[in-house]
Image (cartoon, coloured by chain):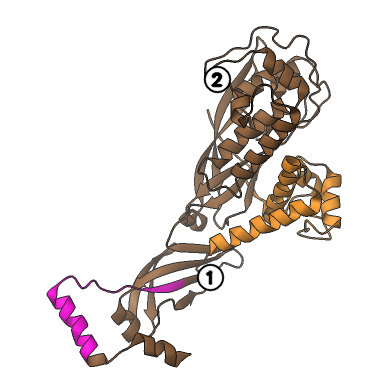
Chain colours: A brown, B orange
Amino acid sequence: MEFKDYYATLGVDKTATADDIKKAYRRLARKYHPDVSKEPDAAERMSAINEANTVLSDPEKRAAYDALGRRPPGQDFRPPPDWDAGFEFSGGDHGAGEDEFSDFFANLFGRAARARRGADAASMRGGDHHAKVVIDLADAYLGATRSVTLRSARLDATGHVVTEERTLDVTIPRGVRAGQHIRLRGQGAPGYGGGAAGDLYLEIEFRPDDRHMVDGRDVTQRVPVAPWEAALGAAIEVATPSGPVEVTVPANSRNGRRLRLRGRGIPGDPPGDLYLELDLVLPPADTEAARELYRAMERELKFNPRQATERSR
Amino acid sequence: MIERTVEVLIIDDDGLSREELASACAVSVEWIERHVASGLLEVGATATMRFTSAQLLRARRLAEIERTFDANDELAALVVDLIEEVERLRGR
């Protein structure tokens, strides 16, 4: 178990007042709020900040933590026996997410430690856990299986807290949309005193992909087309998430034109639609032959795109 | 240790009850009722008081903002409205 320096996490001094701690916590919570922050590790940072605040903002927990003394963060650490003798944890404020804090926290203040002290004799349902599952858009069309690793703390035969990892194979049904939740009953935190286990909620998120945009069950896919395909019309083959489809590009199509393929969005009742957005790609003028073709167009077409824009207004 | 899970439920097929939503957000049922009554949280199906995935996400965000910043209900809702709007714009 690694020692956690909660003062360093919040960037405050050991002599910080309750007010300093609150200010530091809120400043960091604004910076690393996972819905707002662009930092790649925002969610982990936020969890660490919440954990540090849970301990340092509670006078009883802070006093007990201070009594452990200060060690280099990350150092392997075992609390001395009876380290918490003389401290009384109220333990009533079971904050959201506390079940997901570090081993260090679980050992010192966690549910298992409370259970060891017999503070929570009453039967109580375990907390619900939340996690995100990132899937590809294709998985929403076909369904998928994802392994989810969960960590939970329990007491071993000698009364010590041990953390266990278990892996669940979760079947993600076809037709699932971003932002939807899958609920796994009884896979959250274990209950106290014979209470039922909580549930695990998995929020579905699609892996970002620069060719597709998803809105509910409707999917927009950008399809590169050559200028002659757009100008003259063409039958082209497009690899869509539900398989290859032959599509007719109407003549005189402009860049950005959207073609609707009804029912080829994310499956469901009713299924979404697939929109193909034409993305006009110019052939590079990187050979003499290509340059001559462009020059021929320039001579023959007398085309001024600025004038065309003016006229169309 | 790999366990195969048996029960997988997409919430929107069924929806969450008030009690389930409260438990998933670590708030009281009264908290849910208060936010529904003041219009800060919508109900998926009014007759049965069941909540969808989108409302679960919104309720969790509201509860978390209120808890982290000691924010009042309306201010937390304003922040969550903005977060939802940013998400919608980023998705375009």
Which span is picked out in magenta? A276-299
Judging from the image, what secondary structure is the residue with disc 2 in?
Answer: loop
Q: Residues within 10 Å of mark 2 (few under 14, many from 20)?
A: some
Query: The disc labelled 1 sits on which kind of residue?
Result: Asp
- At x 56% / y 67%, what residue is drawn? A272
**Magenta-span inclusion, residue A297:** yes
Q: Which residue corresponds to mark 2?
A: A2
Q: Residue A192's image quarter?
A: top right
Can you give x and y, in whole percent of width and height, for residue B18 in the image? 81, 48
Front in this rendered view, residue A280 or A247: A280
Mark found first going from the N terminus, 1 or 2: 2
* Residue position for label 1: A273
Q: Is residue A180 magenta?
A: no
Q: Nearer the viewer, residue A127 or A311?
A: A311
What is the quadrant of residue A282 in the picture?
bottom left
Q: How many marks?
A: 2
Measure the C-alpha gap from mark 1 to mark 2: 51 Å
Residue A309 pos. (x, y %): 42, 87
Q: Is residue B1 above or below residue A286?
A: above
Q: Classify residue A227 as left or right of residue A23.
A: left
Q: Chain of mark 1?
A: A
Residue farthest along the left direction in this orientation: A288
Residue at left offset 44%, top offset 78% = A257
Q: Position of residue A234 (x, y in %)?
A: 33, 81
